[in-house]
């Protein structure tokens, strides 16, 4: 009977194991897991800390026993694969409880070891406890710490896990300080899109220490690089990770420049008998078509299943993995944040040309009660109108739109093509012109040159070059907040020509960009050199808040 | 200055008018509307009846005055175009308040007259009032009727508008009877998918008169075709509509076999100076690639805008309209119902081969609190794995999945390809293997022959042919309800081989189909002829409820 050994019993590894069993009942399948638990809900860990998931048992989706009885899997926990002998097709396995080692042979091997903290925070023995948020043991320690009276926590790292840790600790009534190296939390968001996240964290009493990092962990808390000392009972280390590729590297398997295990589209490593999936492996970036690291549970599960297909059925029978858009979603208190593809910051850093679209649509028809406004951003390749990335921040309906945008990227729908998508509409659920269609309309107007826009961060330079800023909103809107120095001419007065216009280039703006577009068309038809402020006052305000808040 | 006349000032007509103005400031644009209102929220009308939209003014998105000042549109309400003289390029317009007629010439004409009741219900003068739910006047009459003490209403027609009317009248505390010609309400749903809708209506106290219709309207209510008399203070006629294509027909424009105005992919009628959009026109069905009628506001708006592009920029500069998937969503009390493409009933009637997939996924990870189960159905072309249609009934997350499925159909993602879509996941929002991925997994297993399934309505025939039905659920699940005559062998006992199996073909089933699949794989590997009951006990139960409920 052929034998497949799977290294790592969570997400990708366990998806491979159960799929392989369903494909092939005449195969020995051994799953070797370093930790004491397999198939646990790793994405649920923060929510157990916060108490939203109340039962610890809910995190343990399967046990070695249930996997044996249902899938005839030989699941060995607290065992570690120490080395691979590719020539002999064996792995050396150490029992972490007894220290004994054993050599087990394989026909195929699947590596799903996951990731590790890139630079683990380590305090002295008497320092406050430092915990990651990666395993059942981790959350047991955090929950234990809260139970024994911890009231102040420091979270290091404002990425996915960091922000989930912040929310869930705050939900427990803990005073939380977030220490984040970047100027704004959640790097996949550009500055003006991250501004609402900062607001949301502050609204919920989170202390932000941005553009700073932990220099050392002390007996009373931490000392930051800036010199500031923060007291705490607990430090949660949620900073960056790196692929756990040491075993693969030592076995001579090819490791990519990203540090991840290099695999082909069927998840084969440089040794065709060894497959690898999950956070330890490289993916192909859907935007750059180059290797990248994407540590998403969805990809790990899907690729684990696909690796099983390739093992049981042969690669000819299996569709190759598609490039990863990196679509992601995150709840930050009452805010929903979602991203896909590249950010403006990434494109700028890469010197990649890009068009930008900002909109502020509602999740459903404005005339139907309870409509929630979201802020959306689309990044487009000017050469071919290809969607390069998108960001959405809001509430209800953000999940739906990011999925549509991710799928549009995966299937090659152009930015303008978003305007022609047929999406479900009834007043409680959407708009006849959906938020995604609206992004497409603006993108199409940019593509055809029907509209010219200017970004919030380009406004000062335009003014310095002599442009006049015209605010076409209503007096009530202007009274609630305006761009200093702009000339107020409500849109309907502009149409009537009641107000004389200054000479020279014009920048028009409204609240969200829509009336500004109408104004720009009108003034352009009248012979003016005019641009519309993309995303209107709301995007400008978010951009200003983001930059002023972080560069005081 | 060129002149464009637009007939019909709602949805498609008004989208065309405002877009045309933004494209071209040097054009006379006249909008002629039969009714007293333009640009009203027609999809919102039922919710104003129900009081969820509280302000009547919220329905009036624009007025002739606001459209004049902002877009320089010449909007003429309560005027009707009586005839088109295509040779002279003129329309004859009657002022409905004065009766005076005028002849106005045009360079281009856009027809957006909408639809009409196919067979209007008409009572005698002294009969209870019969109202449609199509205009502001209609809702004024309904709300007036409620204000003057109406307590019992009959809704004729269980389609979109009918079900929205039912919900909203019930919300007002009105006793509602629904009279629907079909055996089950909401024809886009197949029987087993409509069963929850019937439950939901009954739970909310709605009296159902299915497979029946109104024979006549009387002084006290209605008499049904079955002979039953129902008392009522008000009848809402929400039965089928037909395209309002009389004006186009009389002008000699080509009318399709559907009765809708025939247009090309740029919304041009058989006269290239005359465009037509919205409910009066034919669309191309994305499944059959043949003309069809789809009366959706989203398409009307999008096509109106696109017609303006074609008029101002020329058809060469405009992408052709894509075939319509007919994606639709509907709230029925606490239930969300969504459909796209063809139903099983339609495919059967057309003799089109199809595979069927039923699943019952949750909207987000099962271990995270508040997960809501939905029922999903996918219809697939066995020849090329193309998605032919989908139906989803549930709560939260239905809107998101139907949009992904609609977009998959529009972009040619195959049913198996759904398994490889990268969708946004975090525990509050989804699953690592999303509901849509799960549909893809089952579809892929069917495509490759890895699983063979049987539909709920095929079970009796299989039994008659000698199949034994094995229920692999837990004793607790079985105790809560089971398929009569099935043999209970919990999945884990099946693996252990503790129970002897009967000879002959087997049908296995679990609650939703997933464990049944594992069981089928296991038994198949052991040499049995086995099929999995698609969608498990839940789909079988829904199917039985639907058929027993309607054929007592």
Image (cartoon, coloured by chain):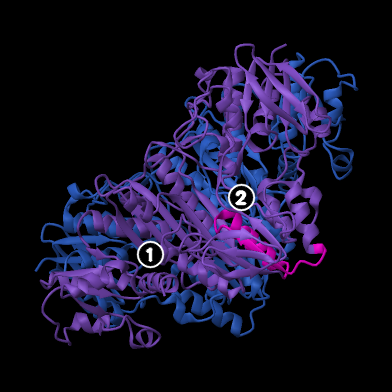
Chain colours: A purple, B blue
Q: Residue at x 61, y 21 (%)?
A: B449
- In the picture of the structure, the residue carrying the numbered disc 1 is A359
What x and y, as percent, mark residue B377?
60, 41
Q: Which residues are magenta?
A: A147-173
Instruction: Quadrant for residue B91, please give it.
Output: bottom left
Q: Is residue B435 left or right of residue A465?
A: right
- Can residue B99 be seen here? The reply is no
Q: Position of residue A422 (x, y in %)?
A: 42, 51
Compare residues A474 and B376 and report the one nearer the observer. Answer: A474
Subunit bearing disc 2 = B
Which chain contains the residue that carries disc 1? Answer: A
SS at circle 1: strand
* Residue corresponding to mark 2: B430
Q: Does residue A323 lie above or below B221 as drawn?
A: above
Question: Marks 1/2: CA distance?
Answer: 25 Å
Q: Name the residue nearer the viewer: A378 or B353.
A: A378
Q: Are marks 1 and 2 on the same chain?
A: no
A314 w.r.t. A435: above or below: above
Residue A163 located within the stretch drawn in magenta: yes
């Amino acid at each position: 009977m052929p034998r497949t050994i799977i290294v790592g019993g969570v997400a990708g590894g366990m998806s491979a194991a159960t799929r392989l069993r369903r494909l092939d009942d005449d195969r020995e399948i051994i799953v070797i897991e370093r930790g004491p638990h397999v198939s646990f809900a790793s994405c649920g860990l923060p929510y157990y800390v916060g108490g939203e998931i109340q039962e610890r048992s809910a995190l343990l989706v399967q046990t070695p026993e249930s996997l044996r009885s249902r899938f005839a899997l030989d699941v060995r926990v607290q065992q570690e694969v120490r080395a691979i002998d590719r020539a002999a097709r064996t792995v050396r396995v150490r029992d972490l409880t007894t220290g004994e080692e054993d050599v087990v042979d394989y026909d195929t091997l699947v590596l799903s070891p996951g990731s590790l903290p890139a630079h683990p925070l380590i305090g002295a023995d008497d320092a406050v406890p430092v915990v990651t948020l990666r395993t059942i043991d981790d959350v047991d320690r955090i929950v234990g710490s809260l139970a024994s009276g911890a009231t102040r926590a420091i979270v290091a790292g404002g990425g996915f896990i960091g922000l989930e840790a912040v929310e869930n600790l705050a939900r427990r009534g803990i005073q939380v300080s977030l220490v984040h190296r970047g100027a704004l939390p959640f790097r996949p968001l550009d500055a003006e899109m991250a501004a609402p996240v900062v607001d949301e964290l502050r609204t919920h009493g989170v202390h932000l220490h941005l553009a700073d990092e932990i220099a050392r962990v002390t007996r009373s808390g931490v000392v930051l690089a800036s010199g500031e000392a923060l007291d705490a009972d607990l430090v949660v280390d949620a900073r960056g990770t790196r692929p756990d590729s040491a075993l693969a590297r030592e076995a001579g398997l090819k490791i990519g420049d990203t540090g991840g295990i290099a695999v082909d589209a069927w998840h084969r490593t440089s040794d065709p008998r060894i497959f690898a999936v999950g956070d330890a492996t490289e993916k192909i970036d859907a935007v750059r078509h180059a290797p990248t690291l994407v540590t998403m549970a969805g990809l790990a599960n899907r690729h684990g299943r696909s690796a099983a297909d390739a093992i049981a059925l042969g690669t000819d029978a299996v569709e190759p993995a598609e490039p990863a858009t990196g679509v992601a979603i995150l709840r930050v208190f009452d805010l929903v944040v979602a991203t896909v593809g590249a950010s403006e910051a990434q494109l700028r850093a890469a010197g990649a040309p890009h068009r930008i679209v900002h909109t502020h649509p509602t999740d459903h028809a404005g005339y139907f009660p309870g409509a929630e406004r979201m802020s959306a951003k689309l990044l487009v390749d000017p050469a071919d109108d290809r969607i390069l990335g998108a960001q959405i921040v809001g509430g209800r309906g953000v999940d739906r739109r990011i999925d549509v945008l991710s799928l549009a990227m995966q299937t090659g729908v152009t930015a303008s093509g978003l305007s022609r998508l047929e999406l479900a509409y009834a007043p409680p659920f959407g708009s006849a012109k959906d938020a995604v269609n609206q992004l497409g309309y603006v993108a199409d107007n940019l593509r055809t040159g029907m509209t010219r826009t200017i970004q919030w961060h380009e406004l000062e330079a335009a003014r310095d070059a002599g442009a006049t800023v015209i605010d076409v909103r209503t007096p009530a809107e202007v009274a609630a907040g305006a761009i200093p120095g702009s000339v107020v001419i409500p849109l309907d007065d502009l149409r009537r020509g009641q107000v004389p216009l200054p000479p020279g280039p014009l920048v028009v703006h409204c609240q969200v960009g829509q009336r500004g577009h109408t104004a720009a068309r009108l003034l352009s038809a009248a012979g003016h050199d005019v641009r519309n402020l993309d995303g209107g006052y709301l995007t400008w305000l978010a951009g200003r808040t983001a930059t002023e808040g972080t560069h005081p």
